Image: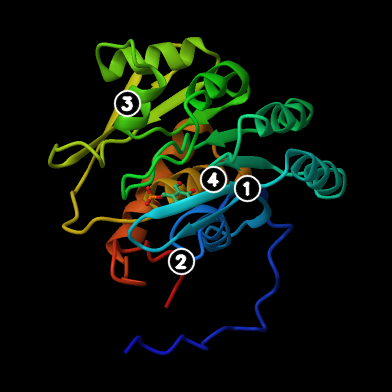
Amino acid sequence: MAPPLSTDVDCSAPPPARPARILCIAGLDPCGGAGLQADIETVAALGGHALGIVSALTVQDSRDVGRVQAVDADLLAEQLRVLVADCRPDAVKLGLIGDVVQLPRIVAVLSALAVPVVCDPVLRAGGGRDLVTETYPQALRRVLLPQVSVLTPNAAEARRLVPEAGSLDDCAAALLADGCQRVLITGGDEPDVPVVNRSYASGGGVRRFEWPRLPETFHGAGCTLAAAIAARLGIGDDPDAAIEAGQRWTQAALARAFAVGGGRRIPGRLPR
Ligand code: PLP
């Protein structure tokens, strides 16, 4: 049986100054490991406030995704327009985009906002199911990347975004040439022990991070990492600090992961 939730909350503590507002555009994962719920939990745990827009509904469990149903692009655009006019975000986190036709609608809002944007280029579920159409990777590169501050592909996503590249370094160079400012290629899906992540900057320079490889497999690790980086950027970190802090925080959440069903574990993002 799961331990009871702690009720030890100090209600006399003063509220923080306005929490950073992080606009999260993501898919809805009913089991709560990935997608918008991962973003909301991460942003809240890091002291921010998430503004949530659903890009797609999904049929899935903790093992794999069965179906993705994109939200109507006009509805998404209307939600975005109304939301950002009232609640101006300090940073944006993009996850699964339901359909290529959503991309230009999202870009129109991002270019007017001019705040840091973290994009997790979700292409395939960890269970193996494709989550996007054939044309999506190239559309993402062409339409979205010029607006992106930090792109967070895993190794498989980096290779699929740049199929012509001979190495992960070449993938990063091509993605930076498309216009994003930083590319953090994560190695959780590679065989290396420890896990190696590399952060590439548009002005040149690569930072290498090593993290212990944990024995379990996870559902929602990529969403959690990208949301943590976005939260730190919204709070005011510079990109290098946000990329490091986001990884450190995600590693701690993975170490606290728990089983929600019979499949992969989900990160322990909230105090329990
Ligand atoms: N469902 C949604 C809505 C997602 O955004 C993602 C990944 O970002 C997934 C499923 C797949 O997550 P994972 O590959 O960690 O299982």
Which residue is under mark 3?
A: 207
- Which of the two discs, 2 and 3, labels the residue nearer the N terminus? 2
Q: Secondary structure at mark 3?
A: strand
Which residue is under mark 1?
A: 24
Question: Which amino acid, by three-letter code, is at mark 1?
Answer: Cys
Which residue is under mark 4?
A: 232
Question: Which amino acid, by three-letter code, is at mark 3?
Answer: Arg
Position of 25 relative to 14 (above/below): above
Q: Nearer the viewer, residue 135 or 91?
A: 135
Q: Determine which quarter of the picture holds residue 189.
A: top left
Q: Foreground mark, 4 or 1?
A: 1
Estimate the spatial distance between the alpha carbons at disc 3 and disc 4, rounded to whole Å: 18 Å
Circle 1 residues within 10 Å: few <14, some 14–19, many ≥20: many
Q: Residue at x 20, y 36 (%)?
A: 190
Q: Nearer the viewer, residue 42 or 69?
A: 69
- Disc 4, disc 1: CB below 8 Å? no
Estimate the spatial distance between the alpha carbons at disc 4 and disc 2, rounded to whole Å: 25 Å
Q: Residue at x 46, y 38 (%)?
A: 122
Q: Is residue 202 visible?
A: no
Which residue is under mark 2?
A: 31
- Which of the two discs, 1 and 3, labels the residue nearer the N terminus? 1
Left or right, 28 with respect to 32, comes to right
Q: Secondary structure at mark 4?
A: helix
Left or right, 18 with respect to 56, comes to right
Where does the image place residue 141, in percent across and percent down from the top left? 53, 19
